[in-house]
Amino acid sequence: MNVTVLSPDKEIFKGEAKSVKVPGTSGQFEVLENHAPIVSALSQGTVKISKPDGSDLTFSIRKGFIEVLYNEVALLVQGVTDN
């Protein structure tokens, strides 16, 4: 699936991923390929993107939103800090 992560000032990540774990407002959840369409607010916590090569990208956010539609995942986040 294609993942794009944007903050107000820069693009954090754009590329293929096997999974994306995010801190939803009701708890952490994971998005895998062919996930049902969803739009959700995100709370403070850690985002983990698992890439096809087996490596992971992790970073913390203060808040944001995620949209999943037809294997396209878009995260709009604020307060990004590297872990």
Image (cartoon, rainbow, N blue to C red):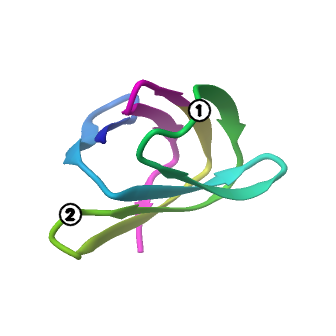
Q: Earlier in the sequence, mark 2 or mark 1?
A: 1
Callout 2: SS: loop
Q: Write down the residue under mark 2.
A: 52
| Image height of 65 relative to 53, above or below | above
Q: Write down the residue under mark 1.
A: 36
| Image height of 5 relative to 31, above or below | above
| 62 to the left or right of 7 | right
| Image height of 59 relative to 40, above or below | below
| 81 to the left or right of 28 | left
Query: Mark 2 to mark 1: distance in Å?
Result: 21 Å
| 33 to the left or right of 42 | left
Quarter the C terminus occupies: bottom left
Q: Position of residue 14 (x, y in %)?
A: 21, 40
Residue that appears at 64% across and 26% down: 39
| Image height of 17 relative to 45, above or below | above
- Few, some or many residues within 10 Å of mark 2 (<14, 14–19, 20+): few
Residue that appears at 45% across and 39% down: 34
In which quarter of the view is residue 37 placed?
A: top right
The extreme right residue here reads 26
